[in-house]
Amino acid sequence: MITKTIVETENAPKAIGPYSQGVGYNGLFFFSGQIPIDPTTGDIVPGGVQEQTRQVMANLRAVLSAAGLDFAHVLKTTIFLKNMTDFAAVNEIYGGYFDENPPARATVEVSRLPKDVLVEIDMIAAAPEDGQ
């Protein structure tokens, strides 16, 4: 039997479907894509792609924290953009969360995202073996 850890926090939006905010197994954590929902209001944050990216990263920080992790533990991300012309703006904000040794990443343009947002990001992270 597989023993997995479900990651949940009130500091990030609740799942809007049959999925978990995050799942851990054997030191690896898989965090579902976060969209720019303000967890206190349940609404999409106002503004453009920059404001949406900041909220997505805040939501990801919250689920990482709920698992006892931070951005230094992130191994891989996928950024989904409604419009690839937003790449530079998203990249500038995203890059501010990874001071050194950034994770592997893929960025793709998609035709549509949940709730018609402009950006969604998911992450894979690992808990260090020494507990740090």
Image: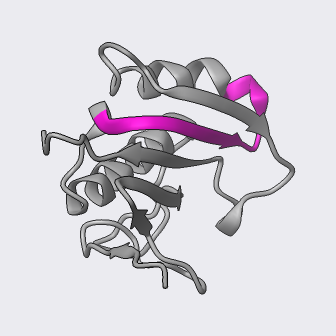
Q: Nearer the viewer, residue 39 or 19?
A: 19
Task: Determine whether 117 is above or below 24 in the image.
Answer: above
Residue 53 in the image, given as x and y percentages of width and height: 48, 40
Quadrant hosting residue 106: top right
Q: Residue at x 24, y 40 (%)?
A: 128
Q: Residue at x 59, y 86 (%)?
A: 18
Residue 51 in the image, given as x and y percentages of width and height: 44, 41
Name the outermost residue toward the front.
1
Q: Nearer the viewer, residue 22 or 107?
A: 22
Quadrant hosting residue 4: bottom left
Q: How is the image coloured?
A: one colour
Q: Is residue 60 left or right of residue 119?
A: left
Q: Residue at x 55, y 26 (%)?
A: 104
Residue 78 in the image, given as x and y percentages of width and height: 62, 40
Q: Nearer the viewer, residue 48 or 115?
A: 115
Q: Residue at x 55, y 81 (%)?
A: 16
> How many labels were placed on the picture?
0
Residue 64 in the image, given as x and y percentages of width and height: 30, 53
Name the outermost residue toward the right.
111
Quadrant hosting residue 19: bottom right
Quadrant (top left/top right/bottom left/bottom right) for the C terminus:
top left
Task: Determine whether 18 is above or below 34 in the image.
Answer: below
Task: Determine whether 9 is above or below 38 in the image.
Answer: below
Q: Nearer the viewer, residue 73 or 19?
A: 73
The magenta-colored residue range is 73-86
87 magenta-colored? no
Task: Determine whether 55 is above or below 9 in the image.
Answer: above
Q: Is residue 126 left or right of residue 117?
A: left
74 magenta-colored? yes
Q: Is residue 128 left or right of residue 83?
A: left
